[in-house]
Amino acid sequence: MHLNERISIEDARDNVHHLLHKDNPTKFPMGAEYASAVELAITMCSLSKPISTSEFECIACGHTAPSRSEISYFVKLQHAALGIQKSDTIAKILGRLMSMPSNRTCTECKGAIQKNTYVEVAPELLVLHLPCADVKINQKMKFCGQTMHLRGVVYYGSHHYTSRIIDTGGQVWFHDGMITGKDMCSQGSVTKLKPKDFTKCNSRKITLLVYTQP
């Protein structure tokens, strides 16, 4: 409705907020009570039909068993099995998620198992949850044969969220509802920022990354 300019983006936001509150008043309270941006992302990115399939595979004998998929429009990257290091990039972490070690053992031979995930068509949207990680943020990366571009970063600290938005022209915009209101503050060209520069913003740490296809 907002794209057709029938209502303002603020009214569209408020309408969605009321619908979410009606569906789950505990997760999405009204007024000044805290609501999690992660829970919002999970809800808004939920799909009726999965975009991926997963299975457990024994490294020794090749026995497989179906598993719950880790990939939708929302992807949680905070897994101990991923062994995240400071030298990692988002692309490397996401790649390891596609073939991730499991603490299970094979029911056939008791061998080690890994969890493999398969995506046939790259999604147009990926929202990645990687709280407080000090890693290198890819401004663009390959995923399932498609180039995904960083379009947004959400930060959290002191019970407050802020964000950066990267537009299609490569300009970075900062938003803090308590300071900038409905406006955004220009931070210049994305080319002036290094991958590490995206991990923090004014002492707040990263919690969500938003990638889209061009």
Image (tube, grey):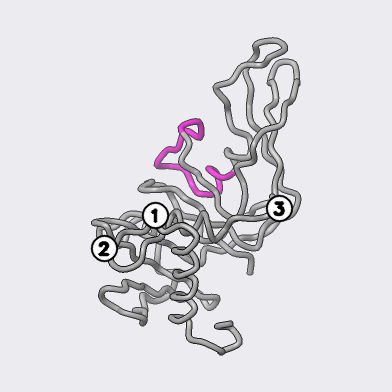
Contact, CB < 8 Å: mark 1 with mark 2?
A: no
Neighbours of disc 2 within 10 Å: few (<14), some (14-19), many (20+):
few
Q: Which residues are magenta?
A: 80-94
Give the Cα separation between the discs numbered 2 and 3: 38 Å
Q: Amino acid at mark 1?
A: Thr
First in sequence, mark 1 or 2: give its number: 1
Distance between mark 1 and mark 2 Cα atoms: 30 Å
Q: Nearer the viewer, mark 3 or mark 1?
A: 1
Q: Is residue 90 magenta?
A: yes
Which residue is found at the position 75% from the left and 20% from the top?
63
Q: Is residue 18 above or below residue 45?
A: below
For mark 3, does the 10 Å Cα neighbourhood hold few (<14), some (14 to 19), or many (20 or more) residues? few
Residue at left 59%, top 55%? 46
Q: Amino acid at mark 3?
A: Lys
Residue at the spot of label 3: 49
At mark 3, the secondary structure is loop
Task: Please report whichever mark, 2 or 3, sits nearer to the chain's N-terminal start.
Answer: 3
Q: Position of residue 124 (x, y in %)?
A: 65, 63
- Which residue is label 2 attached to? 202
Residue 113 belongs to magenta span: no
Q: Residue 113, image x and y in percent? A: 64, 22
Q: Amino acid at mark 2?
A: Asn
Foreground of the two, 145 or 58: 58
Crowdedness of circle 1 by 10 Å Cα count: few (<14), some, many (20+)? few
Left or right, residue 189 beside residue 106:
left
Label 3 to label 1: alpha-carbon separation? 26 Å
Task: Kindly state the secondary structure of the residue where label 2 is placed.
Answer: loop
Query: Which residue lies at the image location 42% right of the left edge and 38% below the top edge?
Result: 85
The label on residue 26 is 1
**Is 182 situated above or below 103?**
below
